[in-house]
Image: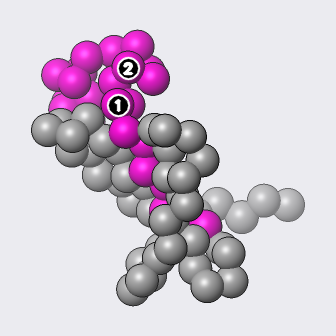
Amino acid sequence: MAIAKILNYEYDSELDALYIKNRDYDSPKATSLTDNIMLDLTEKEEVVGLEIINISHSLNTSVQNLEKY
């Protein structure tokens, strides 16, 4: 059975970056998955955040559309 978690997100229109975090963590270690996707990890390699750069391009939409949310 899956447990639902509330995820927090922020969108930065100047950087066209979406940051999603599932919990606060003081000093996450950033790991690059691709040129546009970074994972934030704890010391135990648990995912605490995800950042996607150029998200409007990835979603095939405009920055203005993303700013609405």
Disc 2: CA contacts within 10 A as few (<14), some (14-19) or many (>=20): few
- Residue 6 in view of the camera: no
| Residue 9 x %, y % | 36, 53
State which region is magenta: 47-69
Q: Is residue 15 left or right of residue 60?
A: left
Q: Is residue 37 left or right of residue 62?
A: right
- Residue 5 in view of the camera: yes
Q: Is residue 11 magenta?
A: no
What residue do we see at 38% from left, 31% from top? 55
What colour scheme was applied to this rendering of the protein?
A: one colour
| Residue 14 x %, y % | 14, 38
What residue do we see at 31% from left, 41% from top? 17
Asked where in the image residue 60 lies, by quadrant, the reply is: top left
| Residue 12 x %, y % | 21, 44
Cβ–Cβ under 8 Å for marks 1 and 2: yes
Quadrant where the N terminus sits is: bottom right
Residue at the disc numbered 2: 57
Instruction: Give the camera-side residue of 20 and 45.
Output: 45
Location of residue 49 with respect to 53 vertically, above or below: below
What residue do we see at 61% from left, 85% from top? 43
Disc 2 is placed on an element classified as helix
Q: Is residue 13 left or right of residue 35?
A: left
Location of residue 19 with respect to 52 vertically, above or below: below
| Residue 24 x %, y % | 42, 78
Quadrant where the C terminus sits is: top left
Residue at the disc numbered 1: 54
Disc 1 is placed on an element classified as loop
- What residue type is disc 2 on? His
Location of residue 34 with respect to 41 vertically, above or below: above
